[in-house]
Amino acid sequence: MRIDLVVLFLLMINTATSCLADETPQRPNIIYIMVDDLGYGDLGCYGQERIATPHIDQLAREGMRLTDYYAGCTVCRPSRLVLWTGKHTGHTAINSNASYVFQPADVTVAELLRDSGYVTGGVGKWAMGGVDTLGQPNRNGFDFWMGYLDQGRAHNFYPEYLWRNTIQVPLRGNVLMDHPQARGRVSKVRETYSHDVMTEHLLDFIRLHHTRPFLCHVHWTIPHANNEGGRVTGDGMEVPDHGKYASQDWPSPEKGHAAMISRMDRDVGRLVDLLRELGIHRHTLVIFTSDNGPHSEGGHKHTHFDSNGPLRGFKRDLYEGGIRVPMIAWWPGIIRADTTSHEPHAFWDFLPTACELAGIDPPTETDGVSLMPTLLQQKRDNPAHDTLFWRYGGKVALRQGEWKIVKTKENQPWELYNLAKDLGEVNNVAAENGERVMAMAAMAAREEE
């Protein structure tokens, strides 16, 4: 096993570095927070003015904010598949929300780090296989998982139960309604909020395992909507209360959306406070991001808070608003405070990043590169990526430098945008740049070979 540059850097600056029993440097903890359907413009540090996110904004002030970070896909399941396997949607088994169960050939970042000695845990939405399948989290690298296994059930924030590993954990007081449009995903009696339960298990996992290196995935389900709840009741933004937004002259779903984000922000603050309390904050990399762009579901409209900011499109689009997401990296003493990077990166970069920090080699078939040179502000001779690629069903997109091509349907022509001059993808310049379009289309075809 190699000792990577990051570990050497830790030793040089002498920040809270401890030793393992075999006297090799302790490897850093890694926490990857990926919330659900949070837009590029939903955070104060990305321009939001009406929703309060003080703890996440503080995370950005103390760390690095990436402006050009991309989700694995524009919807839930394929985006998670990309994150965990380090392969973009040209190389994954699915590129839509089609059902998929992890197979033995799928190698996850959790498996790689667990095999190297990390304790691995996660909370939130899983979506890659139920308790009796090969896709169950404990069979795919996680020592511990608490949350939803089925992404459809994750629409309900007041479910009758969650899963702790293979054990079904009842949630007190929640009773499902029998309305035919509810599809078993809407509760008529609501007492126990799933997000709060999962968060307590997250904090307990860190308390229990903080003396050895751990990988923790935090896949909170807010601010996703309860889609069925929106159809049945008109308000799918389920949250215990609207808090500071209760008196606002907004529709109820918009109050709920804002309250969800502030609740999530509160718990980011609790997480960081715990890391400081345990004395491991200088030995822990925290990444905060979203699984795709903002939604317009459950009665909420992404336009109400300008949730996609300066970007065009939203969830289910391959325009920037559907795939470009907020990303903050925090590691006190290692990542310089109050910094910004415009280097393009994507979900498939997380697996090689985690492997570098663990001191192991990533699989050769990964599409990703390590984030560490960017996070440490090390000069690159070349861009981190020649191209970035996405497919969502019949939609395809590829970015090369400042240029991006988009196809909205299989039988539609390519659109071309210069993101440096036209971040909002308003001016399609394909007609004037035919050779560039042809060359980039050929690149997109090769990404799926």
Image: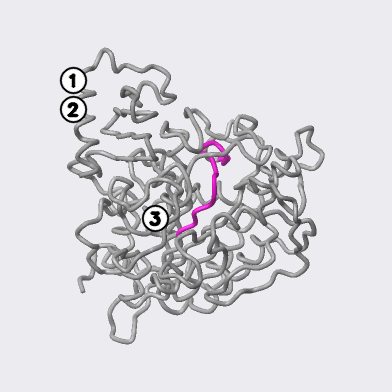
- Image position of 319 (left or right of 237): left
- Image position of 408 (left or right of 220): left
Q: Give, as a three-letter code, the residue at label 2.
A: Ala
Report the residue that reaches farthest toward the front.
180
Task: Identify the image quadrant of residue 157.
Answer: bottom right
Q: Give, as a three-letter code, the residue at label 3.
A: Leu
Question: Reading the chain from its start, which is encountered first: label 2 or label 3?
Answer: 3
Question: Reading the chain from its start, which is encountered first: label 1 or label 3?
Answer: 3
Q: CA distance from mark 2 to mark 3?
A: 28 Å
- Image position of 242 (left or right of 267): right
Residue matched to label 3: 81
Residue matched to label 1: 435
Above or below for 443 versus 357: above
Task: Identify the image quadrant of residue 444.
Answer: top left
Q: Secondary structure at mark 2?
A: helix
Above or below for 316 versus 433: below
Residue 30, x across and y down, in percent: 42, 64
Q: Secondary structure at mark 3?
A: helix
Camera-nearest residue between 170 and 301: 170
Identified at 27% across, 63% down, the residue is: 356
Identified at 65% across, 48% down, the residue is: 226
Residues at circles 2 and 1 in contact by the CB criterion of under 8 Å: yes
Is the residue marked by circle 3 packed among few (<14), some (14-19), or many (20+) residues within 10 Å? many
Q: Which mark is residue 389?
A: none
Q: Magenta span covers which residues?
A: 32-44
Q: CA distance from mark 1 to mark 3?
A: 34 Å
Identify the image quadrant of the N terminus.
bottom left
Is the residue marked by circle 2 packed among few (<14), some (14-19), or many (20+) residues within 10 Å? few
Identify the image quadrant of the C terminus.
top left
Residue 288, x across and y down, in percent: 48, 52
Identified at 41% across, 50% down, the residue is: 78
Identified at 22% across, 17% down, the residue is: 434
